[in-house]
Amino acid sequence: MNQLSEKQPTEDELYPICYVVADDDPEELFLMRTALQQQERPLPIREFYDGQHVIDYLHQNSAIREDEDTHWLLVLDMQMPRLNGLETIKAIRKNPDWDTIPILLFTDEQDQALIYEAIASGANGCVTKPVQLEDYRQLFDDFFKPYLRDPQ
């Protein structure tokens, strides 16, 4: 029998919505995690170090959910091993079940061509990485607020 089908979902796997954050830099992950935990509506956070782990997580988590709601708010770094941010976005958007997942892509570069390509590939936003915790906090507030409905 398939290992995945035997796995019982944990409480936060069935939480209505969570942040999925991918960055190969532990310091950046720490800043993002801290900013997300300080949001007006804190949510569970799943952290990964590359895009392939994000794709694997989405496949696994999708298999235990029966609805088609948006359950993830993604924050991806552009430069990651295995699958970079752009490749991860393209892989996500190939799956029609994931076409409404909000994706915010961070980059260290201010390359307009890269930003246009990210948006054309399916990112909902592409910005240069902030350096201060408060900047992350404000950016996450502004970007994710439209996707967060009040809990019922």
Image: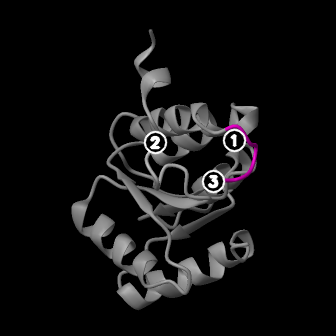
Alpha carbon separation for disc pair 1 and 3:
10 Å
Q: Nearer the viewer, residue 136 or 117?
A: 136
Residue under numbered circle 2: 54
Residue type, numbered disc 3: His
Q: Residues within 10 Å of mark 3 (few under 14, many from 20)?
A: many
Q: Element under label 1?
A: helix
Q: Nearer the viewer, residue 51 or 150?
A: 150
The single residue placed furthest to the left in the displayed view is 26
Lower sequence index among marks 2 and 3: 2
Residue 94 image offset from top left, x and y in percent: 69, 31
The N terminus - image quarter? top left
Residue type, numbered disc 2: Val
Closer to us: mark 2 or mark 3? 3
**Which residue is at a point 61% across and 62% down the rendered structure image?**
112
Which stretch did the figure color magenta?
A: 66-71
Lower sequence index among marks 2 and 1: 2
Q: Is residue 68 magenta?
A: yes
Residue 90 image offset from top left, x and y in percent: 62, 37
Residue under numbered circle 1: 98
